[in-house]
Amino acid sequence: MIDEQTVVNRKQSASDLQSRLKTRKLLGVGELARDNGDIYKSKISQLLGINESLYVRLPKGLLYWNTVTALYLYVFGIMGIVTPSLALRLDYGLEIKSDESAFIARIYGACLISFGILFRSILSQRESRSEIAVLLLVTALLQALQLSVALVFGQRYLLPCLIRFAGIVGNLTYHNFVDSQGGVHRYLMRVIEECSVLSSNGEQREPIAEKKPMKND
């Protein structure tokens, strides 16, 4: 027969184990990564606003890379508003020949400053790796569109094209490091699947047949 003292000891050890697990979860000890690569934040770190573990897990050099990207957006944005001729000459190798071109260059500079403010605000929050991965992907898309427009319309100046090509490669490389679990890819695939399901359900619906009035004999 099992001794009563043994049963009591087992119950106490089980309760101690549960209390230790709750304490570890509260203090954030032994935190595990989620499916998207984010680190579970303990309740204490949430109350104090501390997210150092997530910062440590980011790739090396990402902070410097994002700083260079933000400086590019701010510098050329301000130059586009203040001195549009110099901004276009350095950024695209173009010369402004009319007031309309200067106005368009100033609008372009305002867009760069707006994107730079959004860029820095998202990085300063840094709530999850997936948000940073999306930001890097969007920045790479912006630079790819700039490079495509320059190449298609004949503005093939070597230095601006090389700078944008380096920006695309760098952003995609860091995006791959940050989103190694494929969280952004899974999110996009889920959105595509939901859209396809909605469209298929809409096609499968048959129009309701109109009821014809019955003729009285």
Image (cartoon, rainbow, N blue to C red):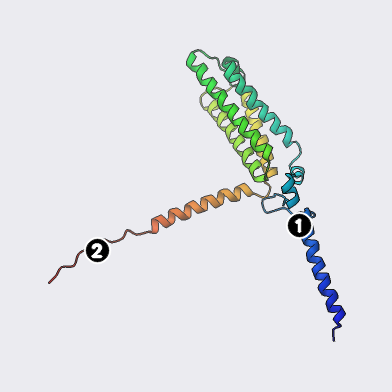
Residue 65: x percent and y percent? 71, 33
Report the side of 212 relative to 68 (left or right).
left
Towards the viewer: 108 or 3: 3
- Judge depth for marks 2 and 1 and give the one in front: 1
Query: Would you say 10 lies left or right of 158 here?
Result: right
Which residue is at 60% across, 48% downward?
Answer: 185
**Residue 162 visible:** no
Determine the image quadrant of residue 178.
top right
- Image disc number at residue 25: 1
Q: Alpha-carbon neighbours of circle 2 within 10 Å: few (<14), some, or many (≥20)?
A: few
Q: Please tell me which residue is depicted at 63% across the width and 49% down the height of the picture.
A: 183
Where is 173 relative to 210, above or below?
Answer: above
Which residue is tagged 2? 211
Residue at screen point 39% across, 59% down: 204
The amino acid at mark 1 is Lys
Q: Residue furthest toward the front?
A: 47
Name the image quarter holding residue 1. Answer: bottom right
Say if 199 sits above or below 176 in the image.
Answer: below
Question: Does the image show residue 33?
Answer: yes
Position above or below: 112 against 26: above
- Position of residue 127 measured from the top left corner of the image (x, y, whole percent): 67, 44
Residue furthest bottom as drawn:
1
Residue 8's x, y, as percent?
84, 76
